[in-house]
Structure formats: structure tokens, C-alpha cells
Image (tube, rainbow, N blue to C red):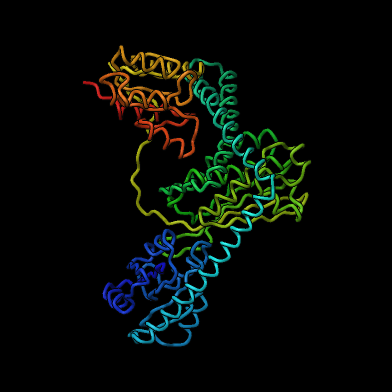
Amino acid sequence: MEKINILIVDDIPENIIALEALLQRDDINIITTTNPNEALRISWEMDIAIAMIDVQMPEMDGFELVEILKSNPRTKEILIIFVTAISKETKYAVKGLNTGAVDYLYKPLDPYITSAKVDSFIQFVRHKREIQKKNQELEAYQKELIKAKDLAEQGKRIKENFLANMSHEIRTPINGIIGISQLLKKSNLTEQQHEMVNLLEISSNSLLGVINDVLDLSKIESGKFKINRTPTDLSKICNDVIDLLRISSIEKKLELIIKLDPELPDTVIADSLRLNQVLMNLIGNAIKFTHKGSVTLSVEVLDTKGNNVQIKFSVIDTGIGIAKENIDKIFETFEQADEQTTIKFGGTGLGLAIVKNLAKLKGGTLEVQSEEFIGSTFSFTNWYEIVKEIKVTKKMNEEQLLPFNNAKVLVAEDNPVNKFLIEKILKSWNVNFDMVENGKEAIEKLRDNDYHLILMDTFMPIMNGLEAIKLIREGYAIGKEKIPIITFSAAVMETDKETAIAAGANDVISKPFEAAVLHKKIKEYVTID
């Protein structure tokens, strides 16, 4: 029988021990904590069915903790039982039940009543999950029936495979374009040439953004997408997005406005990359569909509970708006409001589908209000943990990329643009290197020469990088089986990286790459006596 997870939250350890002893049985797992913030993390990461929460706790009381749990789609179904030693006045019980609790128990607990109540809630959870399981099984059967009868599903899979393969092939030349534009920016350019190179870089990054959207959808649909939360400066992210998109607004003579709540915390725990992606898509869409007027990014603090803050990001435009019957349609993959939208404005119809999926994965809510020919407001709301103290680390700049004197590297790369780019970068670091065009040549070169490191492209003619790595590890270049090998790959799916590591690669660098990333990897693997 599947065990039920019960969370006990109480700031007094003795109370937890007593309650554990009272509830101990074979068909449940008991998880405990004395910290409300830790309780939020546990509830997010684990399948908690029932939570027994003390009312009086420092920093965040039980009522506030439950409000946060109930406001999050991922934790709102947890059955809450309040356990308290405060006054037995009816108003406290009413307040507790109004927050979403199913029961309210008073200390000292009656062991028989407590055990009986918890048992009844466990049975309720089991019945509910059994119903959900049956519904899921029914849905699974229905899906299988649809797949068997509907040949269009086969076409869908072919389309997805095609998009994934094309995304991979396009990333390789994009890497070359972005890399060469960065090299050009360091050379002596006139002001006009510098502006042209900037536009080239912006266009390349825009194209890369479309490809990344396609790959992100593939990862979300396959369940391989990850949210990585780190200390994040919200003001900086918002201002960076506005600065990046300001050129587009100026071209259309639109006013691009940013409004940040004075109460906005300096640093929170968030996935900065995905938050940036959400804002870029929402603001980029707003600019795209607005002919005159303004686009505004408004960031406001809605609520604060202990060390957590609820923040609402709103993108408001004075654009073409969306008809009521089309609002749901715009969030579907490869869909836009209507066929004329694609003809007039272009685009893939991926942006809002990405935003919808990211909002769901991040545990937030996405809302849209729109009036045709008047404008639209897209809002993303989520809870974040405030970071009170953070160590400031300096990002490595290009002046800190020290040379690798006496380092010898073998490079296997067939794309002429990428060969040119890598050659320029390695020469600037005083790296002594040999360049070959496929895996077969790499093995032959390795047999006759000594190297500190191999940089190996994954996809090459005659023999690809993965095949060459396997042969090197198997001893086809005698005595050099353990040489460090870093692969370049335009694929960003986790399975592709896992395949490279399984073949024997020490590390993987995704295209397009930053020079600082390559420098760091070489420094990590190259040891010069």
C-alpha cells in the first residue's frame, strides 16, 4: 500500500516528538520541521497529503503559512489541520477554517480523538487518490484510443522531430555569426560599422530566441525541463529586458515605460533565465502588436508573508487587443489570434505558449485582460523568497581571461565559420593548437602528437565526434585513452548531453558559447607541468 506523507510544522521540537509518537503507523511517512519556510520548500518538493501546523510560530504564523500554501496551485490541495495552544475562542477556529483548514485541534491533544481524526483524513486522501487514479487510467485509455484512430498524431510527431533536427542544424551557423560579430566589435570600427555589427548581433540573438523556444517546448513536453532558482536581482532583470527591447520600440515610435514598486526587494530566489524569458516574450509581443501609444512593464508587490513576497509582473499595451473568442487560442502552440495576424505581423506563435508553460512550472499564475482595438494586459504573479544577505561575486570579463602559455589543444570542427571563430579565440589566449575536420583525422593526429586537451564537435562527416571519443577511450591512440575531451554541441536537450558523457566526453559546451565559458573549461581540464 502506498504510504501517505504527513507534514508536521511546529517551532517546539518536543511538540513534534509527541505528535510523531501519537501518529506513528506503517502506512504513513511523517516529515517534520520547525521552520515555516522549510515547510514551504518541503510542500513544493514532496507529495504532502496532510499538514498539521502549529498556529503560533515566530517570523510566520500558521495562518500566513497556510495562506501561501492555498494560493499555490501545486500545494493548494493539501489537507490542513491546525494544532494550537492559544485561546479556544471561536474566532480563532473560524479564522483557521477560513484560510482553508479542514480541522482545528487544541493542545493538550486527546490521543484517541486526534488519532481518529487523522485516520479519517487519511482514508479520505486514499479514496480521493483512488478516484484520481481511475480517472487517469480512463484518460490514458482514451488517449490510446485516439492515437490508434487518429493518423494526425503521426504527422504531429513527424513535425516535432523535424523542428528538433532543424533547430540543431540552425544553432551551428548562428554560433558562428554571433561569435564573429563579437570579434568584430573588438576591432577598429567606425561608428556606423559598430552600429551595423550591433544590429547583426541583435538579429542573430532574435533568431536564436526562436530556436530556443522550439527546443524549450520539446523539453517541456518530454518532462525534461528544469527550473533553477538562484539569488536574483529583479530590478536588474526588468531594466535589462527593457534596454534590450528599447530599439524595437524606438523603431515603432512607441513609449517603453517601466514602473517598479518602491517596496520591491533587492534580491529574491528565482529562476532568472526563465523570468527573463517570460518578460522578453510578453514585452516583445506587446511591442509587436502595438502601432502607437505605449508599452508598460509594471512590477508591484501584492503581499508579504514572513520572508516571502508575492510579486505581480504586468505588461500593458495600447495595441490591437484580442477578441474574447480568441483569448484562449493565443496560448496554444503554433497558434495566433487568427490567420490575418500571422500574415500582418509574422512570428511562430510560440511565445505565449512558452510563457504559459513556464508560469505553470514556476508555480505562478498567468492572466490576460484585453479589449479589441484598445489594448491588452498580460500579468504573471508568483511568490518569491527574499534574500536578506548575498555575497557579491564578480563576473569574469574578457580582461581576466589569462593566456594558456605552452598549452597544446587538438580541435576537431568541420564548419568553416566555427573553425575561424575558435582559431581566433585560441590564438588570443596563446594556445598552441592543431585543427582537423572529422573524428577520423582527430584519432590519427592524436596517435602522432601529444595534447593537453581535445575540443571535439559532436556532428562531423566521415566520423562524428561521439564515435571518435569512444574509439579514443578504447585505446585506438595507445597511451592516450584518458586525455580530457570537451565536445561542442548545438543540441541542448539533456539526453544529448548525457549521450556525449556516456560516450566518454569529460564535458559539453553548448553552441552558441561565450568565450568566458570556453576559457573556464580549458582552465579546468588543462594541466601544464
Asked if residue 363 lies left or right of residue 502, the reply is right
Residue 93 in the image: x percent, y percent? 46, 83
Q: Image quadrant of residue 286?
A: top right
Q: Report the residue that reaches farthest toward the left.
A: 529
Which percent across, then down, holds residue 104?
44, 81
Q: Is residue 291 above or below residue 38?
A: above
Residue 18 drawn above or below residue 147:
below
In the rendered image, the vertical position of residue 7 relative to residue 496, given as above or below: below
Q: Is residue 271 visible?
A: yes
In this view, the residue in front, 258 or 15, is: 15
Task: Tell me where residue 272 appears, x and y as whole percent.
Answer: 47, 45
Q: For residue 519, which quarter of the picture?
A: top left
Which residue sits at x=53%, y=42%? 239
Q: Nearer the viewer, residue 148 or 353?
A: 148
For image coordinates 48% across by 64% down, the residue present is: 75
**Is residue 201 positioned above or below 477 on the image?**
below
Does residue 405 appear in the picture of this structure? no
Return the x and y of residue 200 as percentages of the image width and height: 59, 24
Q: Quadrant of the C terminus?
A: top left
Left-right relation of 362 to 446: right
Please name the residue shown 33% across and 75% down the image: 25
What is the quadrant of the N terminus in the image?
bottom left
- Does residue 399 appear to the left or right of 127 in the view shown? left
Q: Number of marks in the image? A: 0
The residue nearer to you, when weighing 104 against 288, is 104
